[in-house]
Image (cartoon, helix red, strand yellow):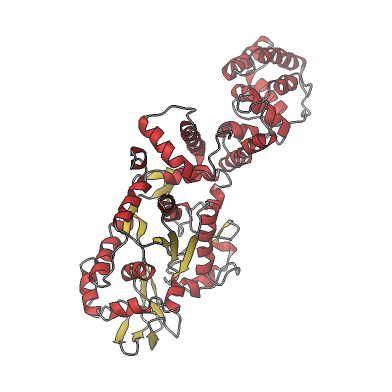
């Protein structure tokens, strides 16, 4: 294999998978418990799998990318934030939080959807994963409900296998987890009386394939979810395996060849899962990939705490190619998704793209990485594409006047005057995204350019100063520092206070008394428009 392939982590993973000599289809898995809003950080397992899948398909393999929604897990707490299927993040005050609180301890698929649009709480938040994968362009992506696996009987044989080895399972788990008592049984029935998941099994009947249980209290973080005390019998389809056993059971049932997971699992459930798979289930664990966590604006992602951003929200401000590029980076390195600095991520992607097309130079590694990875992050390799720099696109977003946008882009050299209509439209697609970013961050680009001359009253000295400034701008229209200096000089020359002069300039261009640094901004606008506005002609 060429050195270019070695620079991409997904190629190395694919090498390890192929070394296992798997049968097609090669099964790649991810999974989460749909406890709340599935956020950008949860897409790690989706997108890491996507790149590995694409490499394997390129090598001629049939691939099945599945994602388990661990929706038979019990609801242990009420999250601070929820979200509608349209992607609107809301607080608990906008839903019936009491209904959620009354259903603590029940499987997510038995908790009513707080928005009433899906069959259950679990279905609601599992839908987000499926939609996000589609938005990111992940092909043939399959979400599998854990509840369905149990209720259909697909988990029954593996559950029986573990229960038949209860003593060995107990001894094995005690090596990895404290507090495993002598009565521990690796199965959690669902109480037929109150519907909660309980952890107390009092007997197992292998012939009948049932367990007897008592509904006892469940510890959930710092709170205790009370059991109802009911004593009953449950089949192996009426409950679930504890997580440390459920994960390797999924590997066996689904025939998993590869699974990425966060470093928390690498330090906890992965070692025990390997041991359970090989010692108790006679199953080869999948090829692993441990990824570092993302943070959001410097803080950990948290569905329960509400520190989340949805894929749909991100795609309001970034092109999908840029987001795929973000996920293509080395998973072993922790990264922060800083929404205030998304312009830097876009600039990085644009340079990566230019390196691929030979329009910019990079190190040997950068060039090899661009050559290998770029085709995976774009829908189509188009050497004629035009990218308007993100922050300049935000400047263009200050006006809705399309013709003015085009003239400004042409003046700055970002669009050729000879570009066809399709190229122009494709280039301008970045503008509303950059505009939305400016609005959400309320940064120096969050202003609206007044395309019609505002009603501004100027005294004689100020009017003369603007006429003088217009002449100077006409001489050096694209030099922001020169224009900024000229603003100070013309104000002083005409005896106008600089603060008053800047405020009048903001009113001329933005219809308000303050705004971004004026000189550099005027240098990015259409020169003819700026000069005419300074002269109050248009």
Can the viewer see residue 297?
no
Residue 146 shows up from this direction: yes
**Residue 99 pos. (x, y %):** 54, 72
Q: Nearer the viewer, residue 57 or 286?
A: 57
Number of labelled discs? 0
Q: Within the image, what quadrant is residue 220 found in?
A: bottom left
**Image location of residue 311, percent across then percent down:** 52, 52
* Closer to the camera in the image, 353 or 467: 353
Could you tell me which quadrant the N terminus lies in?
top left
Residue shown at the point (41%, 70%) measured from the top left:
73
Which residue lies at the image location 67% right of the left edge and 20% below the top edge?
A: 501
Percent x, y for residue 499? 63, 22
Q: Is residue 239 above or below residue 415?
A: below
- The quarter of the picture where the C terminus appears is top right
x, y percent for residue 391:
56, 33
For the point 35% across and 46% down, the residue is 9
State whether residue 514 is above or below residue 189: above
Instruction: Tell me: 151 left or right of 495.
Output: left
The residue lying furthest to the top in this view is 493
Q: In the rendered view, does 228 fall on the left or right side of 354?
A: left
Front position in the image: 80 or 139 = 139
């Amino acid at each position: 294999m060429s050195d270019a392939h070695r620079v991409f982590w997904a190629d190395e993973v694919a090498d390890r998978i192929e070394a296992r000599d798997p049968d097609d289809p090669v099964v790649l898995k991810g999974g989460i418990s749909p406890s709340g809003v599935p956020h950008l950080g949860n897409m790690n397992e989706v997108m890491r799998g996507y790149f590995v899948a694409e490499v394997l398909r390129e090598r001629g393999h049939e691939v099945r990318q599945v994602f388990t929604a661990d929706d038979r897990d019990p609801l242990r707490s009420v999250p601070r934030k929820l979200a509608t299927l349209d992607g609107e993040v809301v607080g608990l005050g906008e839903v019936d939080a009491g209904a959620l609180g009354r259903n603590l301890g029940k499987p997510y698929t038995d908790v009513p959807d707080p928005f009433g649009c899906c069959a259950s709480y679990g279905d609601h938040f599992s839908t987000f994963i499926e939609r996000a994968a589609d938005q990111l362009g992940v092909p043939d992506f399959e979400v599998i409900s854990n509840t369905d696996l149990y209720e259909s009987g697909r988990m029954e044989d593996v559950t029986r296998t573990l229960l038949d080895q209860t003593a060995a399972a107990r001894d094995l788990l005690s090596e990895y987890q404290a507090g495993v008592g002598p009565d521990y049984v690796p199965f959690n029935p669902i109480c037929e009386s109150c519907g909660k998941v309980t952890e107390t099994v009092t007997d197992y009947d292998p012939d009948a394939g049932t367990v007897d249980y008592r509904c006892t209290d469940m510890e959930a973080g710092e709170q205790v979810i009370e059991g109802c005390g009911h004593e009953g019998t449950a089949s192996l389809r009426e409950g679930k395996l504890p997580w440390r056993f459920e994960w390797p059971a999924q590997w066996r049932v689904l025939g998993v060849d590869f699974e990425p997971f966060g470093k928390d699992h690498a330090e906890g459930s992965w070692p025990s899962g390997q041991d359970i798979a090989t010692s108790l289930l006679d199953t080869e664990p999948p090829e692993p990939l441990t990824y570092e966590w993302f943070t959001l604006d410097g803080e950990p992602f948290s569905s329960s705490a509400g520190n989340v951003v949805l894929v749909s929200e991100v795609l309001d401000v970034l092109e999908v190619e840029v987001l795929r590029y973000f996920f293509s980076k080395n998973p072993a390195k922790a990264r922060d998704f800083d929404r205030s600095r998304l312009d830097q991520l876009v600039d990085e992607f644009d340079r990566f793209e230019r390196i691929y097309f030979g329009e910019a130079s990079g190190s040997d590694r950068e060039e090899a990485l661009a050559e290998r990875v770029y085709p995976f992050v774009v829908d189509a390799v188009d050497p004629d594409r035009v990218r308007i720099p993100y922050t300049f696109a935000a400047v263009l977003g200050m006006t809705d006047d399309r013709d003015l946008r085009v003239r400004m882009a042409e003046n700055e050299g970002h669009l050729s005057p000879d570009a066809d209509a399709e190229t122009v439209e494709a280039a301008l697609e970045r503008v509303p995204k950059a505009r939305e970013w400016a609005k959400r961050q309320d940064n120096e680009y969050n202003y609206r350019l007044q395309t019609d001359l505002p009603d501004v009253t100027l005294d004689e000295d100020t009017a003369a100063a603007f006429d003088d400034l217009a002449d100077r701008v006409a001489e050096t229209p694209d030099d922001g520092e020169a224009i900024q200096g000229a603003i100070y000089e013309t104000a002083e020359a005409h005896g106008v206070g600089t603060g008053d002069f800047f405020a009048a300039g903001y009113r001329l261009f933005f219809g308000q008394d303050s705004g971004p640094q004026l000189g550099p901004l005027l240098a990015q606008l259409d020169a003819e428009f700026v000069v005419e506005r300074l002269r109050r002609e248009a």
